[in-house]
Amino acid sequence: YFESGRVFPIRTPPSRPPAASHGKVVFAATVKGSDSNYQVQVELDTSAREMYVECECPYFGGGAFCKHIWAVLLKADREFIKDILLPR
């Protein structure tokens, strides 16, 4: 999904830029799936080294880490995550 350009622009809540704020990075994106568009939300807690994810797809609803989440993480990694986690 990532390589085929099916991840729509990454969005952040209006109050939070895509930067580590108190050790947390929060962002969301829409992924064009096979049957529908799915909303994906990600919260990275850099201080606790934890990640919380959510996707609207039925596969994630069953408790599994879906391909839509991976696509959003790859896009975020390409766009800004390295700069946040590995500041220059």
Image (cartoon, rainbow, N blue to C red):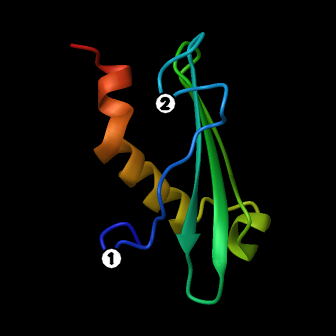
Q: Identify which residue is drawn at 44% across, 61% down.
A: 71
Q: How far apart are marks 2 and 1 (CA)?
A: 23 Å
Residue ranking furthest to the right: 61
Q: In this view, does 57 lie above or below 41?
A: below
Q: Residues within 10 Å of mark 1 (few under 14, many from 20)?
A: few
Residue 31 figure quarter: bottom right
Q: What residue type is labelled 1?
A: Ser
- Residue at image mark 1: 4
> Horizontal placement of 76 versus 88: left or right?
right
Q: Identify which residue is drawn at 30% across, 30% down.
A: 82
- For the N terminus, the quadrant is bottom left
Q: What residue type is labelled 2?
A: Pro
Q: Is residue 34 above or below residue 22?
A: below
Residue ranking furthest to the front: 14
SS under mark 2: loop
- Residue at image mark 2: 18
Sequence-first tag of 2 and 1:
1
Q: Nearer the viewer, mark 2 or mark 1?
A: 2
Q: In this view, does 8 lie above or below 13?
A: below
Q: Identify which residue is drawn at 65% across, 70% down.
A: 38
**How far across and how far down the image is residue 78, in percent?**
29, 46
- The answer to whether residue 62 is visible is no
Given contact means CB atoms under 8 Å apart, are the residues at marks 2 and 1 in contact? Answer: no
SS under mark 1: loop
> Horizontal placement of 38 versus 44: left or right?
right
Nearer to the camera, 69 or 25: 25
Residue ranking furthest to the bottom: 35
Residue 62 figure quarter: bottom right
> Horizontal placement of 58 versus 85: left or right?
right
Q: Identify which residue is drawn at 45% across, 49% down.
A: 73
